[in-house]
Amino acid sequence: MIKPIIAGLGLAAVLPALALAECAEVSQGDLSVRAAWSRATIGTARPAVFYVTIQNNGSTDDRLTGIETRVAGMPMLHETVTKDGVASMPHADAIDIPAGKTVSLAPGGYHGMLMNLEAELKEGESFPVTLQFEKAGEVSIDTEVLPIRAREAACGVAP
Amino acid sequence: MLKTIRIALWIAVAVSLVVVGVLLWRADRQEQAAAFRPAFSLPDETGAIHTTEEFKGKYVLVFFGFTNCPDICPTTMSEVAQVMDDLGPQAEKVQPVFISVDPARDRASGLDEYLAAFHPAILGLAGDEASTRAAVESFKVFADPEKAASAPGGYTMSHSSSLYLLGPRGDWLRQFEYGTPADDITADLKGRL
């Protein structure tokens, strides 16, 4: 009688951890990269997005200088800048990842713009993205395709 | 004694003048706000023209954007979709409208299919250059093709990224700046419905 309850409680404790663990994390050098996600697309005509969280655990600054992925012919880094209520999306040459800081590419700020899609991004699928860092080199991470209505990573990582 | 009363009376006069002034100023401001009725007259994907008149009696949430934008537009449409879901039955008194500032390209790539993926209630409008310009000017917002070789089609758009709320008589009520959580928008609307 008691056993199933204990098992149930154990499961209840473990399940959220499992849900979090679903979010891939890749570490290389001082950097850890996690919570990579994108939104499903309709066809390939419109660009897709790439969001990710990068943590610099070291004592030297690094920079994200570019992204590569097989799903898009032309991936680029952009920043959404809102000034006086007007949004513009200038190209970002590089994104600083200061020592000891966590930087998120997230809605309304820095984001990867995946242009010239090779195929429609379907919800539930995932694809690899390689991030190029000035010091840490190349880091590849599996990127989850979330529903088109998604507003944040499924594993709920906040900056 | 008499002097004290005289001073007190003068203070009372001063205070009442200030109060009257504030009341007049507020009445004037309310009148001005009520007088601002931005308008659009734009076709949907089938070519049927929709105007602000058509939605009298409803609250209208207007967003200017373009579907080739990977960040702000999907994020805002997601918020709007969440608001419509959270409003439940009251959602029928709210009409979300997406006005394309990149109409030719948005028509070609299927505006309705795109918006329906967020929420079936969102009405997508894409006019010609003149009617789009007229809507942008009427709402006193900003939309400008920004030359950038890095964007698909060779340019991207700087555009006003707020949601604009019109009341049941078509009068401008307020804007929700980009990033306003869906819960806050829902709470504001519920307070009015």
Image: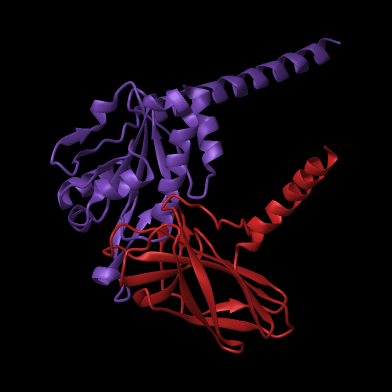
Chain colours: A red, B purple
Name the foreground residue: B170 vs A153: A153
Name the foreground residue: B44 vs A128: A128
Q: Is residue B22 above or below residue A13?
A: above
Q: Is residue A89 left or right of residue A109?
A: left
Q: Residue at x 44, y 24 (%)?
A: B90
Q: Residue at x 47, y 67 (%)?
A: A111
Q: Is residue B34 above or below residue B49?
A: above
Q: Quadrant of residue A23?
A: bottom right
Q: Is residue B131 above or below residue A40?
A: above
User: Which of the image's four quarters has the C terminus of chain A?
Assistant: bottom right
Does residue B140 show up? no
Q: Position of residue A18 (x, y in %)?
A: 67, 58
Q: Residue at x 48, y 23 (%)?
A: B192
User: Which of the image's four quarters has the N terminus of chain A?
Assistant: top right
Q: Is residue B129 left or right of residue A58?
A: left
Does residue A66 show up? yes
Q: Position of residue A134 (x, y in %)?
A: 56, 88
Q: Is residue A149 left or right of residue A119?
A: right
Number of marks in the rendered image: 0
Q: Position of residue B36 (x, y in %)?
A: 35, 32
Q: Position of residue B19 (x, y in %)?
A: 61, 21
Q: Is residue A108 above or below residue B56?
A: below
Which residue is at the far left?
B47
Q: Is residue B141 left or right of residue B46?
A: right
Q: Residue at x 72, y 78 (%)?
A: A57
